[in-house]
Amino acid sequence: MQISGMGGAAKEYNNTFDAIGKIMRREGVLAMYKGLSAAIMRQATYTTTRLGVYTSLNDAYKQKTNKTPNLLASMAMGMTAGAIGSFVGNPSELILIRMTADGRLPVAERRNYTGFFNALFRIAREEGVLSLWRGCVPTMGRAMVVNAAQLASYSQAKAYLVSSQLLQEGIGLHFTASMFSGLITTAASLPVDIAKTRIQNMKVAPGEVPPYKSTVDVIVKVIRHEGLFALWKGFTAYYGRLGPHTVLTFIILEQLNGLYNKHMGVEGSKSGL
């Protein structure tokens, strides 16, 4: 949906459900899981790095100041964690974008990657190793927005719910805070996610001028040719991915942190979010 209607062309999909139906009819049910290996590798690189960095920064802040981080501190730590994690995970992100968008290309132009490692080696061989970091700047920009919104909103929502005595520490608290975080993150990050997707998916032949030069160029052209609200194109699908992902990530992370604190004997300002 993010690359549908580029440059003012006719939209391929009317909404999320229309996209699902057309993809399944055109490419088959398994096409809904195209790029799964790249998606798993993305989580194994990007997500583990960003959460590890954020948790470490959060722990260091608590130990140094002996208090919970405020909103600005949480956002700064989230942006730092997002930038580092996205740089590590950019190759997986690039491959995921290409594999999921391959089916909409003409048959003669399809890349036909058979899996993550096939794509990794082919891109490195055919386009150069550094091309695996194509779109790294908008990816880092998107990750900084996502993590500043997601991690900071989760930490602040959790702190507010506890301090106001609306909820106590437990899965109910983690679920409520993560639902709020998922909604905020979706609204804040979708415009830069569209820019990242279009830059990473574009095909540029030698000597040709690329359709997009930067994140700002994508956003300006989308607004000019497709309208302001096109920056939130695919909102339902994006929230359908990011919402459950946020909830599951934080609930599982909190449970693992709890087990770590219990079995490693961490006292006082416990490790975690």
Image (tube, rainbow, N blue to C red):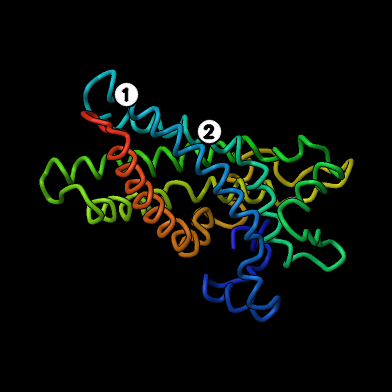
**What is the x, y in percent for residue 6?**
67, 58
In front of the other: 48 or 190: 48
**Viewer-nearest of discs 1 and 2:** 1
Of the numbered discs 1 and 2, the one sitting upstream in the chain is: 1
Q: What is the number of the mark on residue 170?
A: none
Determine whether 30 is above or below 214 in the image: below
**What is the x, y in percent for residue 65?**
25, 19
Q: Which residue is most to the bottom?
A: 25
Identify the residue shown where x is 28% and y is 25%: 62
Can residue 273 be seen in the rendering of this structure?
Answer: no
**What is the x, y in percent for residue 1?**
59, 63
Q: Is residue 247 left or right of residue 32?
A: left
Can residue 34 be seen in the rendering of this structure?
Answer: yes
- Is disc 2 placed on a helix, strand or loop? helix
In front of the other: 151 or 203: 151
Amino acid under label 2? Ala
Query: Which residue is label 2 attached to?
Result: 83
Determine whether 185 is above or below 6 in the image: above
Identify the residue shown where x is 56% and y is 72%: 14
Q: How many marks?
A: 2
Q: Which residue is most to the left?
A: 165
Quarter the C terminus occupies: top left
- Is disc 1 placed on a helix, strand or loop? helix
Q: What is the number of the mark on residue 61?
A: 1
Q: CA distance from mark 1 to mark 2?
A: 19 Å
